[in-house]
Image: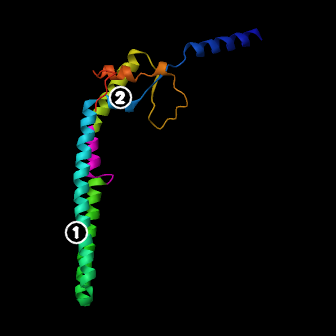
């Protein structure tokens, strides 16, 4: 019986000795400190605004075509109506295709976002990895990811360390 108790005691002691070390970071906070991220966001917003204006202009043209069609259809033959309706439908398809090309999941905006943001994310991940290795952490969580954190002791917030490793100043936010 004493052997079992001793084995359990040493097993428990071994588990407590090898406890894992955790930390968390706030990726939103880190990104707010990065001027290149702010610049990328502005560039993406400008592209999005430009393309949205094009979509709006094309949509207004379709609206004008509808109004003109409605006003003229009493004077049109069936063949003329079909041609005008086909023109309007083609224009609508053109706008939808343009929207998909620009704003769709595989569209130009998504590709540009990946092109601009991926290097920033890679840089952050390298800084997190270096910080975790130097502080001998076993796991680092992102407070803003899918993982739910019901409580996070500020003592384990390593966001400032990551910001410092990126060569930025923790207290200074970029706009």
Q: Position of residue 159 (x, y in %)?
A: 39, 24
Residue named by callout 1:
61
Residue at 23 percent of width and 46 percent of height: 46
Q: CA distance from mark 2 to mark 1?
A: 44 Å
Tell me the crowding category of disc 1: few under 14, some 14 to 19, or many 20 or more residues within 10 angstroms, Cα based.
some
Residue named by callout 2:
30
In this orientation, which residue lies closer to the viewer: 123 or 169? 169
Q: Is residue 155 above or below residue 149?
A: above
Tell me, yes or no, whether the highlighted magenta stretch contains residue 115. yes
The residue sitting at the right extreme is: 1
Q: Is residue 146 above or below residue 58?
A: above
Quadrant containing the N terminus in the rendered view:
top right
Start and end of the magenta stretch?
104-116
Q: Position of residue 43 (x, y in %)?
A: 23, 42
Tell me the crowding category of disc 2: few under 14, some 14 to 19, or many 20 or more residues within 10 angstroms, Cα based.
many
Residue at 45 percent of width and 22 percent of height: 157
- Residue 94 visible, this angle: no
The answer to whether residue 163 is left or right of residue 20 is: left
Quadrant containing the C terminus in the rendered view:
top left
Q: Are marks 2 and 1 in contact (CB under 8 Å)?
A: no
In this orientation, which residue lies closer to the viewer: 37 or 64? 64
Looking at the rendered structure, the secondary structure element under dot 1 is: helix
Residue at 59 percent of width and 13 percent of height: 14
Tell me which secondary structure the magenta stretch mostly adopts: helix
The numbered mark, 2 or 1, whose residue comes first in the sequence reads 2
Q: Is residue 101 above or below residue 93?
A: above
Q: Position of residue 65 (x, y in %)?
A: 23, 74
Q: Is residue 92 above or below residue 33?
A: below
Tell me, yes or no, whether the highlighted magenta stretch contains residue 141. no
């Amino acid at each position: 019986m004493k052997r079992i108790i001793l084995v359990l005691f040493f097993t428990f002691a071994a588990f407590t000795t090898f406890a894992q070390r955790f930390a968390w970071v706030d990726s939103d906070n880190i990104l707010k400190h990065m001027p290149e991220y702010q610049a990328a966001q502005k560039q993406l917003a400008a592209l999005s605004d430009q393309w949205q204006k094009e979509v709006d202009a094309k949509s207004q043209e379709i609206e004008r075509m509808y109004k003109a069609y409605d006003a003229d259809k009493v004077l049109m033959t069936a063949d003329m109506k079909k041609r005008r309706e086909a023109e309007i439908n083609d224009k609508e398809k053109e706008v939808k295709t343009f929207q998909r090309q620009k704003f769709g999941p595989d569209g130009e905006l998504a590709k540009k976002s990946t092109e601009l943001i991926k290097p920033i994310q890679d840089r952050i991940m390298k800084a997190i990895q270096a910080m975790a290795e130097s502080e001998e952490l076993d796991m680092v969580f992102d407070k803003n990811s899918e993982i739910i954190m019901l409580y996070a002791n500020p003592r384990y917030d390593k966001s400032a360390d990551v910001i410092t490793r990126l060569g930025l100043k923790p207290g200074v936010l970029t706009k």
